[in-house]
Amino acid sequence: MAVTVVKDTGPVFTLPGNTTATKFAIGDLVYWDSANSLIKKADASAASTYAEFVVVIPADTGKADEVNVGVSRKCLLTDEDSSTFTAGGTIYLSETAGGNTQTRPTTTDALVQVVGTAISAQIAIIEIALRREMAVDAVFASLIGSAAAYGVVDTTLVGLELQDGSANAIGRWSLPIPENVVGVKTVWLYHASDEVLDSSDDHKILAYAGGHDQPHDSATDTLTTTDWSTTAADDINRRDVASAFDASGLVDPGSLLTFSIEKEEEGTGGEDPIIIGWQFVFEVV
């Protein structure tokens, strides 16, 4: 396929490629490897190698050890030799490094990143969006344990009340991960109580995840949180518990995330927090 940038290229940046041994062609999808300060070919096989640019100027051979490559976030591509595209079809980042495809990736944990649209059999618009945030809520819990119960705050707000000690009161939630996820920005846990809470309760968050044809606990993480104190009854409080979800492989595109919270230790005051809900703020492309 002979691909050529024809017009409507966005701002062009010149960035170093990885080595002279790696050949970049016009139309290759690439990402910035910040650890090595180089661009590399993007690959939908992993969320960390999502596409950030498209190559519009393949190389500057004037450098001996690194290849300068012109990249942009937008351009119009044409295949001068054959009919490559299906007109009107969506174009995705491929699981072949640097490539694009009109077949939506379906491999377990593969990233589904839309990078353009075909406007004819030979011409495609490539437009790579900036990474952005997506908020997803989890508000319903299944209750496990002899002391698990729903609690009410100020007669109107209902949530999971974490009563008594370890493993006696557990709430469990499940959340499908978006297929275009590349990271977790924050995880807000909302809780309240109909009375003032002291700082002596401890709670444990357990997280599990698995993709298609994988065990539900292929990846795991835990976090013990302390000091759930509140200054006034009926107040809403939230805490960032993203560190309970940062284990490798836990938040992969298209996987199912299951997480629970249990009271690890009963505090001196005997009060019980009520879990209202969770908000996951994902980074997506």
Image (cartoon, rainbow, N blue to C red):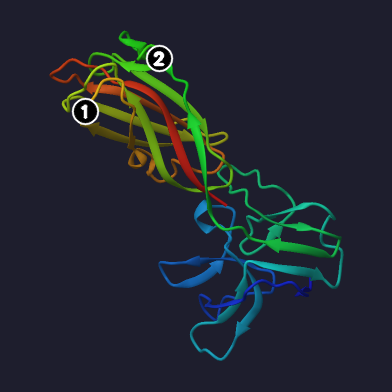
Q: Where is residue 271 in the image (x, y as percent from the top left)?
A: 21, 16
Q: Position of residue 198 (x, y in %)?
A: 17, 24
Question: Disc 1 residue type?
Answer: Ser
Q: Quadrant of residue 230?
A: top left
Observer able to see residue 234: yes
Q: Which residue is located at x 38 percent, y 20 percent?
A: 171
Instruction: Name the residue nearer the viewer: 282 or 111.
Output: 282
Q: In which quarter of the image is the N terminus?
A: bottom right
Q: Residue at label 1?
A: 229
Q: Which residue is located at x 50 percent, y 67 percent?
A: 32
Q: Where is residue 150 in the image (x, y as percent from the top left)?
A: 38, 12
Callout 2: SS: strand
Is residue 18 toward the left or the right of residue 121 in the image? left
Instruction: Name the residue nearer the viewer: 200 or 28.
Output: 200
Q: Residue at label 2?
A: 143
Callout 1: SS: loop
